[in-house]
Each structure stands twice: as structure tokens, then as C-alpha cells.
Amino acid sequence: MAAPKRRTSKMKQRSRLAAIAWRAPKLRQCPKCGGSVPGHTACASCGTYTTRSGKEIIVKAEA
């Protein structure tokens, strides 16, 4: 069975653990209703999906 030849340094271990740390999701504002929306997701309240250039792609059907 293989065993590590040298002990992992504190810096290497901490760098590895920092990469898998939890981070809060980044939210953007919906241009139509102003609600918080995660990236690449249609707005839950008004149902629109807008690109960075302002082009509307998906519109929720009015019921």
C-alpha cells in the first residue's frame, strides 16, 4: 500500500480546503421587477430571462 513520502504542509492543506469552502450564491437584480435572481435563471416573480445585452429570451405565459 502506498504511503505519503512527506507530510503535507499547512499552506498546501489550507489552500486545498479553501477551494472547497462554502460561498454565498451571487444574485443579480431582475431588470423588470427588481427581484433577486441567481445567474442564468428565469425570474421567479415575473418569469422573464434577460441577457446582459438586455435581450429578453423567455417570457412566462400569462395565466
Image (cartoon, helix red, strand yellow):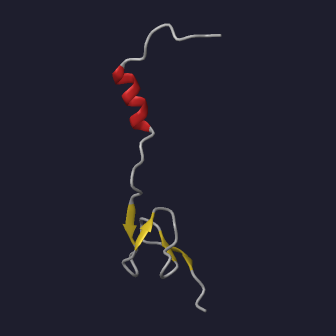
| Quadrant into which the C terminus falls | bottom right
Q: Residue at x 65, y 10 (%)?
A: 1
**Toward the viewer: 45 or 12?**
12
Q: Residue at x 39, y 50 (%)?
A: 23
In x, y percent, where is residue 52?
Answer: 42, 65
26 up-or-down from 63: above or below? above
In x, y percent, where is residue 33?
Answer: 39, 81
- Which image quadrant is residue 27 in? bottom left
- Which image quadrant is residue 60 in? bottom right
**Toward the viewer: 17 or 44?**
17
16 up-or-down from 55: above or below? above
18 up-or-down from 42: above or below? above
In x, y percent, where is residue 30?
Answer: 40, 74
| Residue at the limit of the structure toward the right, as seen here | 1
- Which image quadrant is residue 12 in? top left
**Toward the viewer: 6 or 50?**
6
Q: Residue at x 43, y 30 (%)?
A: 16
| Residue at the limit of the structure toward the bottom, as seen here | 63
Q: Residue at x 36, y 78 (%)?
A: 34
| Residue at the limit of the structure toward the left, as seen here | 11
In x, y percent, where is residue 24?
Answer: 39, 55
Q: How many marks?
A: 0
For this view, does 1 lie left or right of residue 32?
right
| Residue at the limit of the structure toward the top, as seen here | 5
